[in-house]
């Protein structure tokens, strides 16, 4: 089946924000498209100002992330990533934890490959 065909639309009017399951309070997401067969999706992800995560992340999917607004600092790598930066992470790549002093919004594409 794959992701649905979606022509341009105003996501602000049609899709609501929701708390990310299992994440710190205030980290919210808006799922833009989803492939129900594979679980692959595209989402907007928002971190509130002043939040610090405490987990090192390792995923079983490809993850592409583009920072739309704000910045975040990878505490382990001691690197700060700002608006306009992009990452493409293969499965099992470690990243985080993060400090987000001023808030951050990203566009994220998750792709599960079987």
Image (cartoon, rainbow, N blue to C red):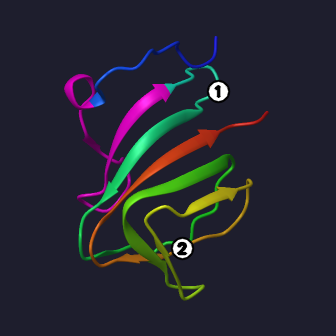
In the rendered image, residue 32, in percent from the top left (x then y), is placed at 42, 30
Q: Residue furthest left?
A: 13
State whether residue 16 is above or below residue 66.
above
Quarter in which the C terminus is drawn: top right
In terms of sequence position, does the residue under pointer 1 or pointer 2 come before the other? 1
Count up the numbered dots: 2
In the rendered image, residue 44, in percent from the top left (x then y), is placed at 39, 44
Is disc 2 surrounded by few (<14), some (14 to 19) or many (20+) residues within 10 Å? some
Quarter in which the N terminus is drawn: top right
Which residue matches tag 1?
38
Instruction: Please say if the residues under marks 1 and 2 sit with CB atoms less than 8 Å apart.
Output: no
Residue 8, image quadrant: top left
Q: Which residues are magenta?
A: 12-33
Which residue matches tag 2?
96
Q: Which label number is shown at residue 100?
A: none
Find the distance from the CA under tag 1 to the CA under tag 2: 25 Å
**Residue drawn where x is 54% and y is 33% of the image:** 41
């Amino acid at each position: 089946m794959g992701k649905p065909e979606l022509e341009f639309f105003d996501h602000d009017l049609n899709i609501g924000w929701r708390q990310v399951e299992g994440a710190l309070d205030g980290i919210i997401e808006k799922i833009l498209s989803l492939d129900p067969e594979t679980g692959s999706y595209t989402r907007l992800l928002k971190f509130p100002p002043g939040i610090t995560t405490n987990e090192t992340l390792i995923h079983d999917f490809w993850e592409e992330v583009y920072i739309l607004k704000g910045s975040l600092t990878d505490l382990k790598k001691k690197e700060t990533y700002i608006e306009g930066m992009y990452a493409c992470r293969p499965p099992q790549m470690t990243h985080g934890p993060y400090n987000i002093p001023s808030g951050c919004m990203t566009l994220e594409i998750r792709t599960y490959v079987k």
